[in-house]
């Protein structure tokens, strides 16, 4: 898989003010995007992280992720957004990345009723392979993508909302990766809900620095061979 990083430069110098800012703990949240092939999973991720859209379709093989730092309720959060393969022959490659997820985004294409019907199996597959401890309350979000193609709609807003309600009031957004419609709002909700459930457990913090002196002390105490 490919890895990309957004908004982080390891070569940046640390001024006194930046050192003071670095004392704020950074929280890592892992988000998985699932759905049929060609519903726009990669496009949604690229629109949110890079603010760009491409009309060229390229199937995701296995899994890929981008990261983005945002502020949620005065907390600095790093979203690690995993884009997984929708094509059946690649799906097994992505399953390994489900574990440890803090949120799952289920995406369908409003112009493709089959992609909506398959949300149930995507949800079931995630719960089986990710095996979250809080399966009943795990934070899912459903996105009905390609809202810019309204005249070709096959899935009504009410049908999608009713399904989400039946699954425990899952938040629902109709999005357009092409026109950036509701993309920012959707991912903000995704991050906020993931953070809320993560706060009930022990969150993963990203260390800013390594204390080399402490490491040396540990080595001496541990009686390591020289």
Image (cartoon, rainbow, N blue to C red):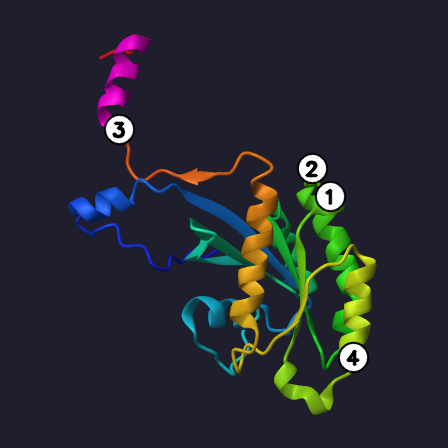
* Residue 10 place in picture, x, y as percent: 25, 50
- Residue 61 shows in the view: no
Q: For numbered disc 2, what is the local secondary structure?
A: loop
Say the numbered circle drawn on residue 135: 1
Is the Cβ of the residue at disc 2 closer than 8 Å to that at disc 1? yes
**Quadrant of the snapshot with the C terminus:** top left
Q: Residue at x 71, y 78 (%)?
A: 110
Q: Is residue 6 above or below residue 44?
A: above
**Disc 1 to disc 4, C-alpha distance:** 27 Å
Q: Which residues are magenta?
A: 211-222
| Residue at the disc numbered 4 | 156
Tag on residue 211? 3
| Marked residue nearer the N-terminal end (3 or 4) | 4
Q: State the predominant SS element of the stretch in magenta.
A: helix
Query: Left or right of 38: which side holds 56?
Result: left
Return the x and y of residue 19 as percentages of the image width and height: 23, 43
Q: Residue at x 25, y 15 (%)?
A: 217
């Amino acid at each position: 898989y490919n890895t990309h990083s957004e908004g982080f430069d390891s070569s940046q110098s640390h001024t006194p003010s930046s050192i003071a800012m670095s004392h704020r703990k950074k929280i890592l949240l892992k988000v998985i995007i699932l759905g049929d092939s060609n519903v726009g999973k990669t496009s949604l991720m690229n629109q949110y992280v890079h603010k760009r859209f491409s009309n060229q379709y390229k199937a995701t093989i296995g899994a890929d992720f981008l990261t983005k730092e945002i502020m949620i309720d005065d907390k600095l959060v790093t979203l690690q957004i995993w884009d997984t393969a929708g094509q059946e022959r690649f799906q097994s490659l992505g399953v390994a990345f489900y574990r440890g997820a803090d949120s799952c985004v289920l995406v369908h294409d409003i112009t493709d009723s089959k992609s909506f019907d398959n949300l149930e199996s995507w949800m079931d597959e995630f719960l089986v392979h990710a095996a979250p401890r809080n399966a009943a309350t795990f934070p899912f979000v459903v996105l009905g993508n390609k809202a810019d193609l309204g005249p070709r709609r096959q899935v009504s807003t009410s049908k999608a909302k009713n399904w989400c309600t039946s699954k425990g009031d899952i938040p629902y957004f109709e999005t357009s990766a092409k026109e950036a419609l509701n993309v920012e709002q959707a991912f903000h909700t995704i991050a906020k809900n993931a953070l809320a459930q993560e706060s009930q457990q022990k969150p993963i913090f990203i260390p800013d620095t390594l204390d080399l002196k402490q490491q040396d002390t540990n080595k001496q105490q541990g009686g390591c061979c020289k």
